[in-house]
Amino acid sequence: MTDSVPEGTDELLAASRGLLGVVARSMAPALEDVTVPQFRLIVLVVTLGPTRSGDLAERLAVGPSTLTRNVDRLVAGGWVERRPGEESRREVLIAATQRGWDLVAEVTERRRQELATVLLRVPEAERAAVVTGMGALRRAMGEPLPEEISGFGG
């Protein structure tokens, strides 16, 4: 291992492969209807609430035309809707429909159940350290908990 790679990187890499498996299995049924980027967009509007297109494009690191194409497909599928902004009727917000909310809830519950099973396999004496470590990793990756998200663009 080189000096530029911190100790534990290989362990983290292996764990990330396991987590990717959990994510893939939890999303498999949803991928019959939407792509991974489209699902991420639905998750954002469920989490953030109605959000301006520009803010979504920035958050997803995509161009406006890519976002518009994805939104068009999601609107056609009944996953999200466009609605006028509350402060300016010219402003268009993207919001999840009930169908979008239901999809995110189903995927989240499948993932939660599988992760709970994995966590129960961790010896009880080590479980708190794993949870603390995952919290530190989550924060280092900039992934907030839902309750930590302000109304980004909403």
Image (spheres, grey):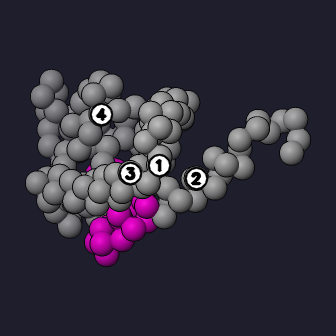
Task: Name which residue lies at 57% across and 53% down.
Answer: 16
| Residue, disc 2 | 15
Quadrant of residue 48 in the image? top left
Q: Establish if 46 lies above or below 145.
A: below
Q: CA distance from mark 2 to mark 3?
A: 16 Å
Q: Is residue 32 one of those drawn in magenta?
A: yes
Q: Position of residue 148 (x, y in %)?
A: 33, 25
Q: CA distance from mark 1 to mark 4?
A: 25 Å
What secondary structure is the stretch in magenta mostly built from?
Answer: helix
Q: Quadrant of the C terminus?
A: top left
Q: CA distance from mark 4 to mark 2?
A: 23 Å
Quadrant of residue 39 in the image? bottom left
**Amino acid type for the residue under numbered disc 2:** Ala
Tally the marks. 4
| Residue, disc 1 | 122
Q: CA distance from mark 1 to mark 2?
A: 13 Å
| Residue, disc 3 | 120
Q: CA distance from mark 1 to mark 3?
A: 5 Å
- Left or right of 21: which side holds 70? left
- Closer to the N terminus: mark 2 or mark 3? 2
| Residue, disc 4 | 146
C-beta proximity under 8 Å, tags 1 and 4: no
Task: Name which residue lies at 35% across and 65% down.
Answer: 27
**Amino acid type for the residue under numbered disc 4:** Pro
